[in-house]
Image (cartoon, rainbow, N blue to C red):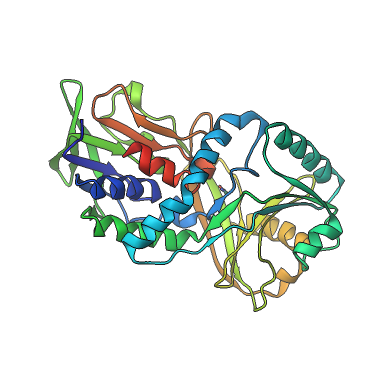
Amino acid sequence: MKPERVAIVGGGICGLGVGWKLARAGVEVVLFESGRAVRESSWAAAGMLASHMELRPEEEHITFLGRRSMRRWPAFLAELEADADLAVEYRDEGTLYVALDRDALEHLRFLRKHQEETGLPVEWLTGSEAREREPFLSRRVAGALYASGDHRVEPRALCQALVRAFRAAGGELREESLVEEILLADGAVRGVRCGGDPWEADAVVVAAGAWSGLLRGLPEEVVPPVRPVKGQMLAVRMDDPPLLTRSVWAADGTRFAYLVPFSSGRLLVGATVEERGYDREVTAGALLDLLRVAFDALPGIYELPVEETWAGLRPASSDNAPILGPTPVPGLHMATGHYRNGVLFAPLTAEDVA
Ligand code: GLY
C-alpha cells in the first residue's frame, strides 16, 4: 500500500535519496535533520563507486549488492541532474591499486586471484605499465591491479543535487530539527516527535547514519546495530595538468591511502578507519600516515597546497552490509548501516526503500 505521509529521519545522501523518490511519486514527505543536511558522512565521503576494488573475500554479500547499485548509477544520476538542474561530475576511469613494497604486492596477487575467481574484470599491471597510465606515480610502485569497472562521483555536488532535487519534487526539509522520539501505537509506527510536537506519518524511514541506533522509541528488537567508524581525510589542490586522473589506492605492508582526483583540481586523500565512538578530531598522526603513503605513491603531492582536512563517521553495521527496508514494526523502515559504501549504494537505497 502506498503511504500518504512519510517522515524521514536523517538528511544525508540516503535519506534525501529515499525522500526524493517518494516525493516524485506524489507522497507527502518531511525530512527531519538534527543539524544541517548532508553535513555528516555524506559531506565527508570521497565519492568512490568501488564495487570491484572494495571486494573482500569475507564480504561477497556486499559486492553482489554493490554491483547491482553500480549498474543503476548512470540512470540515477541523469534523473537527479535533470530534477536538480545541476551537473554532477561522474568519472569512469577505474581504480588503480598500487603496491609500494613486496608485502603489498603479495596482497594484491591474493586480491587479484579472488577477484578473478569471482568473475570481476581486473587487470594486472607491472610498475612501468602503471606509470604509463599515471605518469607521476613513483618508481616505488612495484605492480598494480586495475579495476576498470570502478567509477567515482563528486560527492559534494551530489549532496547539493540531492537537496535540490528533493525540494524540487515537493519534499520538505526541516534542518536543526532533532527527532526526539519515534511514535508508535498498537505496535505500529504513527510518526515522530520533534520540538515537542508530534508529526503523524504512515511510515517512518530511519536514515540517521551513525546515529540510527540512538533514536528513542524504537522497540529493542528493531534498534539497528550501527556504530560510528571514524575516517580522517584531507584535500589538496592540484595544478594543471593534474598530477593524477584516476582513483589510486596505495599500500605498503602496513599502511594504506586512497587518492581521488576531480576535474576541479581537488585531490582527496583518505581515509583512516578508527573505532573512536563519536570523536571527530582531526589528528596530526593520521594526516601524517595518510600523507606518507600518498607521498610514497605520488611524490609530487609534496608541493601541493592543503585545502581542507576533516573527519567523518561511517555508519558501520555488524556485518558491514547496509540495513535496508521494512522492519517487523509496521510502517518502520531502515536505510542505514552503509559503512564504506554510502555513495555506491545511493541508487539502490533510494529506489528500493522508496
Ligand atoms: N569508501 C571509502 C571510505 O569509507 O573510506
Query: Residue 8 at what x, y percent from top left?
Result: 27, 43
Query: Residue 226 at what x, y percent from top left?
Result: 44, 34
Name the quadrant containing residue 135.
bottom right
Query: Residue 317, relative to residue 153: is it above or below?
Result: above
Q: Nearer the viewer, residue 197 or 129?
A: 129
Query: Residue 197 at what x, y percent from top left?
Result: 12, 43
Query: Residue 195 at what x, y percent from top left?
Result: 17, 47
- The residue at the far bottom in this view is 240
Query: Residue 293, relative to residue 185: is it above or below?
Result: below
Q: Can residue 332 be seen at all in this image of the molecule?
A: yes
Query: Residue 161, relative to residue 214: is it above or below?
Result: below
Q: Can residue 33 be seen at all in this image of the molecule?
A: no
Q: Is residue 161 left or right of residue 45?
A: left
Q: Nearer the viewer, residue 274 or 160?
A: 160
Q: Nearer the viewer, residue 72 or 37?
A: 72
Q: What residue do we see at 60% from left, 31% from top? A: 59
Q: What residue do we see at 33% from left, 44% from top? A: 18
Quadrant placement of the C terminus: top left
Quadrant placement of the N terminus: top left
Name the quadrant containing residue 353.
top left
Q: Is residue 135 left or right of residue 321?
A: right
